[in-house]
Image: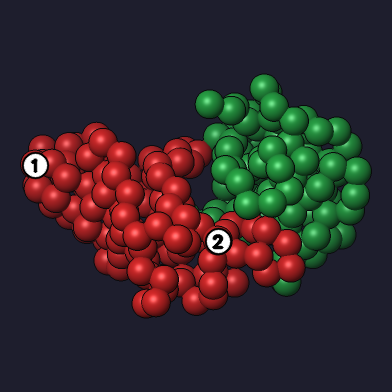
Amino acid sequence: SQQGEEDPQALSIQEGENATMNCSYKTSINNLQWYRQNSGRGLVHLILIRSNEREKHSGRLRVTLDTSKKSSSLLITASRAADTASYFCATDANTGGFKTIFGAGTRLFVKA
Amino acid sequence: GAVVSQHPSRVICKSGTSVKIECRSLDFQATTMFWYRQFPKQSLMLMATSNEGSKATYEQGVEKDKFLINHASLTLSTLTVTSAHPEDSSFYICSAKRGGGSDTQYFGPGTRLTVL
């Protein structure tokens, strides 16, 4: 079963605006990762944040993690049309073997 | 970064036939590989975890006799969809980790299976 939920399910913004996506999960985790997927393609790893970290940056990406609320957010600043894709959070939890469970994903559409 | 390939990228087959999908780690040895399936506009669902030289561990609800997984070497895992039916049509994605513990996963580009 999937680990968590993401919201919004879909997000449409104008180029230049910021996009924020949220992810919640259910069990204790070792780390949380965000991935991007263009339609019909494989996954691109964006960023990994460990359970003892609260915030991480990578270029235009900012990820936060709140383990007390079991939630994370991904912020994309100054969005571009090329950022149009689906974004998934995924958690690594030691539940009888390390495996990565994906959230439902947010479909982002950036209008030029 | 590490590269994982899948072959074929697309396959169309008739109902009742079996289809084999290969997942290879090209520049590292993968002790653990994972197989996911993804239906249109949905998330990735973990099907099974495979460790080199041992039997795969299947997720609840995944039929091990229908989805045969072989991880014969540290660079190759195969998923065989046996007696495929139209409802097996999906996007199948593999991933590989260097170590058995929590570590970065490298994803393959996926295989689009269409069963007629």
Mark 1 or 2, nearer chain start: 1
Residue that carries the numbered disc 1 in the rendered image: A16
- Percent across and percent down for residue A109 are 22, 48
Residue A30 is marked as: 2
Chain B colour is: green
Please tell me how crowded label 1 is: few (under 14), some (14-19), or many (20+) other residues with Cα within 10 Å. some
Quick check: A94 above or below B48?
A: below
Secondary element under disc 2, as helix, strand or loop, is loop
**The N terminus of chain A - image quarter:** bottom right
Quick check: B67 above or below A27?
A: above
Q: Which chain carries label 1?
A: A
Residue positioned 50% across, 39% down in the render: A42
Q: Mark 2 lies on which chain?
A: A
Residue positioned 37% across, 77% down in the render: A69
Residue occupying the far top of the picture: B27
Please tell me how crowded label 2 is: few (under 14), some (14-19), or many (20+) other residues with Cα within 10 Å. some
Q: Which amino acid does label 2 sit on?
A: Asn
Classify residue A97 by image quadrant: bottom right
Along the line of sight, the residue nearer the viewer: A55 or B4: A55
